[in-house]
Amino acid sequence: MKRTWSIAKRVLKELFRDKRTLALMFLAPILILILMKVVFTSNSTTDVNIATVNVQSSLVKQIKKVDHIKVYKYSTQEKANKALKDQKVDGIVHYKNGNFYVKNANTDASKTAATKAALSASMVATNIKELKSTLTAMAAANPQAAAMMQSKSQKTPKIHNTYVYGDKDTSFFDKILPILMGFFVFFFVFLISGMALLKERTTGTLDRLLATPVRRSEIVFGYMISYGLLAIVQTLIIVLFTIYVLKVEVLGSLWNVVIVNVVLAMVALAFGILMSTFAKSEFQMMQFIPIIVIPQVFFSGIIPLDTMAHWVQNIAYILPLKYSGQATTDIVMSGSNLGQIMGPIGALLIFLVVLTILNVLGLKRYRKV
Amino acid sequence: MGNAIISMKNVVKKFGKETVLNHIDFDIPQGKIIGLIGPSGAGKSTIIKIILGMEKTQQGTATVFGKIMPNRQLLNRIGYMAQTDALYESLTAKENLQFYADMKGVSGQKANRQILHVAEVVELTNDLNKRVSGYSGGMKRRLSLAIAMLGDSEIFILDEPTVGIDPALRRQIWSELHKMRDEGKTLLVTTHVMDEAELVDDVALILGGKLIAYDTPANLKAEYNEDTVENVFLKVEDENEKNVVYR
Ligand SMILES: Nc1ncnc2c1ncn2[C@@H]1O[C@H](COP(=O)(O)OP(=O)(O)OP(=O)(O)O)[C@@H](O)[C@H]1O
Ligand SMILES: [Mg+2]
């Protein structure tokens, strides 16, 4: 146990003295996140065209007042639908039987959000005007006013949203963020730990280390502790940055996000160590990136899996990033607790156990006991 | 020999098709310094790695303290210095020593005492807090030797410990090795420096993967009728080459 700690301490010391690698691990993800945020939300100021069908003119007027929103009145739902199909408008607001039916093209999540915001803001504004007249009545007779208020609130129109593509959660950045977080952790831990062990091998320190009474498992666990701690810090930085700077909402517990990512980091570490045994140089280690890392991006959920052929979907089950993506998405977007994401975490743990055993056995190549 | 502390029995080692060690047999008694000498590529480092259990043999066994290697626990009783310096360059010398002390299971006050002692032997006391990346080649060699001396080893296996070390310090290191021998430790040392071969108790002469001679320097000199071990070495090498030609 003491040796395990000592190895972990040594690995951390080496890492913290390598300022460039540290910067890569902690700053590069933030830089990429900022870039992605800018890229995927840059069109928020473009104009949004809304078609209205059968909407009272006071409300239409109110919507028109909103910046960057243009309103087109259509006489029938069919005509509005055609306009939506022809991409002349980005959404339709249809008033029917006292309710609003909103159909969003939803090809651009920011436009959908703008439509929703415009509609609800305008409704509040019109409601306030109506409230004023109610207040006048309230001055006349109290009990009657209360009754009126009640009947009014019962009649408040409901808004029903439908989407041509996706659903109400669709914001591309929001959607890929939880997956992206896992990707950063996986990528950097995989690469840096793989390189570290490769360096131990090529400089002879691994051989030298194995000439001491150290257990093979103590080496593997020492690496796990140090990279686990590193993953905690990295995940915290990424999560805190996305919450407080990029203002992305995390519905579930932040700590659950950290837990998932630490488990993922362990898997990445075990993967990195295993792969490093097949590499003879740093360059050969880099060659694993297109083989091990990139395919995981495709199957992690950034591209919707259900649009792929069935047999292709099955590939995802052997890729760790799929499970972490699933678990983190559930925590961030649906507020799942630990119990609800036990499935994906369990899958990650299976990966971890298998890879760790392989690593401990793999070190036998360098010392037979 | 009953009191052999290290012994090789009929060891054959091949790398691929190339036979590197060809039926090597010897016993090393406790409390001696044995010099393993032979030309480059003779198989000295390979012998050492087999004794430590780092390489597998095709035939035969190496035993240390009567137990067949590889054996992880026995490594605690062996101090090893590899031919190539394997140091953590971004750590200081002290941190390197501390780390290997931990690996050898030495801790606390005892570790600190030992670190200071071995640093003194190799004259690195004033450079202990310097990072190894800033060390010269000879300093790295000395640090490797210091690391090998940590712990409570009874056997020291040193692969060319004095390469790149200046004559004055080399003399000092040898007097330390003799002191260790006098305390009952056993040392197996490879060397290319022939006057160092005069300082050992027994010489094991390796040539082309074969043990050509195993005797005291004095006996060897008498047997080959030469006045230095170096000349014995050259003579043996010469004879061996003639054999190859006639074969
Ligand atoms: N890992 C290896 N793979 C293949 N061949 C090897 C390996 N290690 C050593 N050899 C071969 O075994 C032979 C003996 O090597 P060894 O390192 O034991 O020599 P040495 O006597 O220590 O030489 P030197 O004095 O130069 O250190 C050499 O011919 C070398 O090419
Ligand atoms: Mg050698």
Image (spheres, coloured by chain):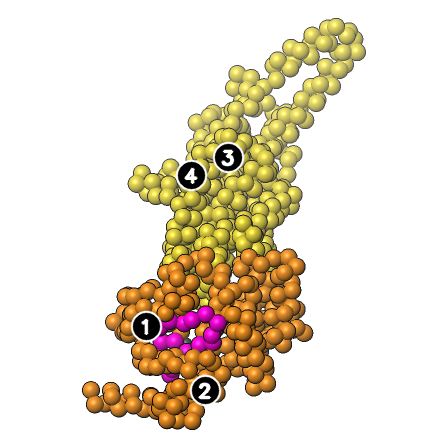
Chain colours: A yellow, B orange
In the picture, the disc for residue A347 is 4
For marks 2 and 1 on the same chain, the one whose residue lies earlier in the sequence: 1
Assess mark 4: CB under 8 A from ligand 1? no
**Marks 4/3 same chain:** yes
Q: Amino acid at mark 1?
A: Asp
**Separation of residues labelled 3 and 2 (CA atoms):** 72 Å
Q: Amino acid at mark 2?
A: Met
Q: Circle 4 — which element? A: helix
Per the image, the residue denoted by label 3 is A330
**Marks 2/4 same chain:** no
Q: Is residue B131 left or right of residue A302?
A: right
Q: Nearer the viewer, mark 3 or mark 2?
A: 2
Assess mark 3: CB under 8 A from ligand 1? no
Q: Please give the range of residues in magenta.
A: B24-44
Q: Answer with the quadrant where ligand 2 appears in the image.
A: bottom left
Q: Is residue B196 above or below residue A106?
A: below
Name the residue located 48 percent from the left edge and 65 percent from the top edge. B78
Residue A224 in view in this figure: yes
Output the chain of dot 2.
B
Mark 1, Cα crowd under 10 Å, few <14 / some 14-19 / many 20+, is some
Q: Pointers 2 and 4 in contact (CB under 8 A)?
A: no
Per the image, the residue denoted by label 1 is B25
Q: Quadrant of residue A308?
A: top left
